[in-house]
Image (cartoon, coloured by chain):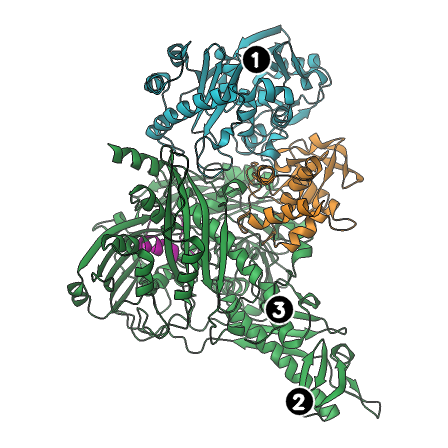
Chain colours: A cyan, B green, C orange
Amino acid sequence: MALAHEFDYVRPQSLTEALQLKDKYKDKARWLSGGTDLIVNIKEGMMKPDLLIDIKDIDELWQIGFNSGKLSLGAAVSFSELIDSEDVRQHFGMLTDACRTVASTGVRARATLVGNICSAVPSLDSAPPLFCYEAIVHCASVDGKRDIPIDQWFLAPRKTALADNELVTGITLTAIPNSAGVYVKLGRYGGEDLAQAGWGVMVDHNKQYRIAHCALAATPKRAYQIEQLLAGKELSDALIEQAIALIPQETSPITDIRSSKEYRLHVSGVMLKRGLQAAYDRLQGKTVEAHKLLGGIA
Amino acid sequence: MKDYKYIGKDVIRIDALEKISGAAIYGDDIDFGANLLYAELVQSTQAHAIIKSINTSEAQKVKGVYKVFTGKDFPYKFGLYMKDRYIFAQDKVRFVGEQIAAVIAYSPGAAKRGAELVKVEYEALPAVLNQMDALADNATLLHPDLADYPHVPWFFPKPGTNVAHWRKTRKGNLEQGFAQADYILEDTYTVPRYAHCAIETHVAIGKFDHSGRLTVWSSSQSPHTQRHLFAEALGLSHKDVRVIAPHVGGGFGGKAGVTMEIIPAALATKLKGYAVKLRYSREQEFINTYQRLGVVARIKMGVTKDGSITALDHKIYWDAGAYVEYGANVVNAVGLSAIGPYRIDNVSIDSVCVYTNLPPGGAYRGFGYSEMLFGLESHVTRIANELKLDQVEFRRRNAIKEGDLTAYGAKMNPNGLVECIDRVQAAIAWGKKPVSTDPNKLIGQGFSLFWKAPAMPPNASSSAFLKFNEDATINLIISGMDIGQGYQTVMAQIAAEILSIPPSKIRVETPDTDRNPYEWQTVASHITWSSGNAVKKAAIDAREQIFALITRVYHYPIDELYLEDEAVKCNTDSAFILPLKDFVVDGIMTSDGTFKGGPINARGMFMPEFSSTNGDPETSQGGHPNVHYTVGAAALNLEIDKETGKMRVLKAALAIDAGKALNPDLVRGQITGGLLQGLATVLYEDMRYDANGKLLNPNFTDYKIPTAMDVPDEIIPIIVEVPQPDGPFGARGIGEHTMLPAAPMIANAVEDATGIRIKSMPVTAEKVAMAILAKKG
Amino acid sequence: MKEINLTLNNESRSVLVEPNEILLDVLRDKLGVKSPKCGCERGDCGACTVLLDGQAVRSCLILAVEAEGHSITTVEGISADKLSALQEAFIQFNSFQCGYCAPGIILAVTELLEKHPKPTLEQIKESIAGNLCRCTGYTPIFNAIMSLTKEEK
């Protein structure tokens, strides 16, 4: 069915042109890349922009590059491209896990990681890996460029640090040498679902850990207390139990239509436990199928 | 058994090419040119309220808006079994989402913009959002005028209450039955509402031309029933109402009867010369079509210690929604059949249809039997376990057999229930469940029987026209709907078998009520049986016409003629072979140059003349409301992650007695499809309402229907064939039944694995995990 | 209104569209291609799947103006000369019932087979996980696709 809302559409050929338009329209203009979120929001009356600025003709936003441990992703790079990237799989395995749980192939062919973080929903699957790889969000406007670390990016549900005249041009992730990570997601069934809980768990050869979660608080978060507890230690049942005991302090889950607060908390413990084990398994070169870690149909 | 050429064979679907090449036309695919208008609905935001005013002035001003209509334009009642609905709300709204007005515009966007600007002022009334509250003394009445509503004679509404229909079935002596019992188990089971989720949403286009003739194109399981209801509600002659039903993108009961289709039909009558289209969004599809009814079931069952059921008291309270014109018949059907496929001498059933301020309940694949069987088959497993009897053996011992009396006193039809039990038991290796190597995993086995009868008026009928073309291909003109089950193919197979014409040479089109003969509806899993009988008769009629002509021209006795390989042959003269294509249209030239015969046009009709609804209102004894039951059994192995509660069906076996599987692969297709639909209702689907009666999950984001990732590892479909004496080649329907055993089977397997009995659907991973956690303490 | 030019089923087409028109609607209402279906309008069901430059995408989430200069393929396009082996297998294995989801699923699998001529069951499932089918239970779809991987020796 046609959109009830009417708007203009432009497809600038350069970044400068795009930024000038956005500066003129501010929040009356919306960036369009994959559109998988934006078009739904316009259809359902959640957004009523006057102008859509399609960034897909701006060449520099399409880059996907891996250099000396750093992965640079342009704003127009789709989830499918990320999933298919051998560099990403090898050095940012947790990101591949997470991307594969976002929607489905036909949506991932268009949807972008940058668009995903701009939606800033609490259940953002891509957030835990971005926290663990300490992503930097690159923004640009007519006023210049600025970099925002991922832990300063999410301000509230659906609210980011991006100004209304800015564009996210890309993201940079930093690989951790000799590490392995896994993204564990709780959904209601085998098919695509919004996360009821998501845990990114990473460990390196020096037993340093990075752990982050989504869908368990108003914004995705890094679990620093758990990281500190585990730092430098060999995993044991007792240590894992101590880590699990910290989950209520690290999270503030709610009850909603998808899950109760109690179930989110309970399964978070299971996810952390199995996630840690799976990360170790990967570190030792074992194959781990992240989507099967919680059992069930998959 | 007779050797058939086309019956019982995996004939390729005759609609395959058009559906696979993209050629198949569905309702929304039809082009209407320049005179097409679009309707958008204004829907109630209140569960129960008086409409104080409707202001359409702002909407009228929107560029592209043509007209706005409200309830006052259409003060007509309609309904299939009880006339309790209006085309648009009149003075009151009774559920969130009820249609109040329609904005008509030249584009869908303008219609939407207009609809957003219609202002409705309400005066809220107390709302009742579940059936038990609605039954309470002093509950708000949804329909104070219930006494005045016309309804079929087999409904028993209770005016002055919210009870729209109360089906009572009484057999034997309940008190004595419980007195004979060594053990009595009593408990309550609940089932929420569910949505059909056909991938195609409802769409209908109405056109009232300048000659005063109404045509409605609709995605429908019931074109003739729609024509009848449109004619009745709008005061038109049946001859002036035409319903054209293109391909249907999934039905599952949701496109049975009449829901939104009456809106464009009615709107068209005020928009002479235009076509007006209403296509539901996915959200509207969830909110304002039929939904599967919710259930609270109280079951009390008595058994002897050697495992015979002595008595059953089954009380089922249905959340039937704001209007029950179709849904009350779900209640009725189950009220006659809530003994399940068991032989029970002492029975009391109360099946109570309750109005609530939620969307109308109606037909959904299984027609209430899924809801009933969740409780009953859970209960049967529990009672067998309590007695330390094997639950399968317990079921076998009590299984209903041919000639046993049903709850309403009629004799049970021939059936292969015990064979189904035996074969499922073997296929699943009952009692030898696998053991998981993963310490986090438990494995349980679950078993369930099922049965279901078509729920139809006693005079529901089918008919068929069959005409030959010059090359002896056939147009089979019938009015059932191929909603995916393969109806067109199977009907072609029946005609093919009688007339020796390959099914690929038979064209079956979707119906047009002007040109196709009467068919009640494509519901109730009755169409193979009922329409199949009509088609068989039509084919026999054609054959008789052919033989009569041959006899007239060639003087062979009729009983020496037969059809083979698209030709007439004679069993006393092997030299006589007359290809059908030589004469079925053009006739046969005789020696004097004249022609005898002419186009062969045949017809057939079927009505179950033995059926009656004249049972006693207090006991249901006496009538013959159900034509027959289809039965079966199923079992599965379920792996459960004991920490997360997540479940995986490792293997499932389902056996169904099809009477005769006219096309076994299509039967297997119903098993794999129906079973998954059933598993989804128990594992993750359900409709969630907030405290104001608003549906919280009207989309696939939060109403999860199964994906390719959610399929059991292995499904073993088993076909049993104990012929139905009055079925075409012995066939009876199987389409709905394949989802019936899923829910109790899962609940039974969960208990087998974990010792935890879950008595409310759905049995989600969360429920299982939290119950395991609670049990641990 | 803006004129856009695109390749539709190997033919050059141009069409006038408003910026807020959805590709699915334009394909169906202005370009006469009816096999992409509307099922949910928000990318959940996959009935509107088309191939955009060979990639299966949701045409309900794309603006028609975005298709300027791109190539769109629908089931009409791949059925133009004769059915593909995949389509033949769908018929053989009864991999559809009502048929409404079939065009989308065929296109999604067409892309899969392009990338992975011998997909595993897991790859098959992932490729169509976003294409909802309410009728078949999916198993007949898996069987049809797996049969192609076997025949190819």
Q: Nearer the viewer, residue B200 or C83?
A: C83
Q: Position of residue B129 (x, y in %)?
A: 32, 45
User: In terms of sequence position, does the residue under pointer 2 or pointer 3 come before the other?
Assistant: 3
- Amino acid type at mark 2: Glu
Q: Quadrant of residue C70?
A: top right
Which stretch did the figure color magenta? B354-377
Kindly report the distance in space between the C-alpha atoms of the residues bearing marks 2 and 3. 24 Å
Q: Quadrant of residue B149?
A: bottom left
Q: Nearer the viewer, residue B147 or A135?
A: A135
The quadrant of the image that shows the N terminus of chain B is bottom right
Q: Which mark is residue B560?
A: 2
Is residue B540 positioned above or below A290 on the image? below
Q: Which mark is residue B752?
A: none
Look at mark 3 in the image and give the residue it sits on: B493
At 54% across and 13% down in the image, what residue appears?
A178
Q: Tell me the SS state at disc 1.
A: loop
Q: Position of residue B437 (x, y in %)?
A: 41, 37
Look at mark 1 in the image and give the residue it sits on: A175
Q: Tell me the SS state at disc 3.
A: helix
Whether B360 is among the magenta residues is yes
Quick one: label 1, few (<14), some, or many (20+) residues within 10 Å?
many
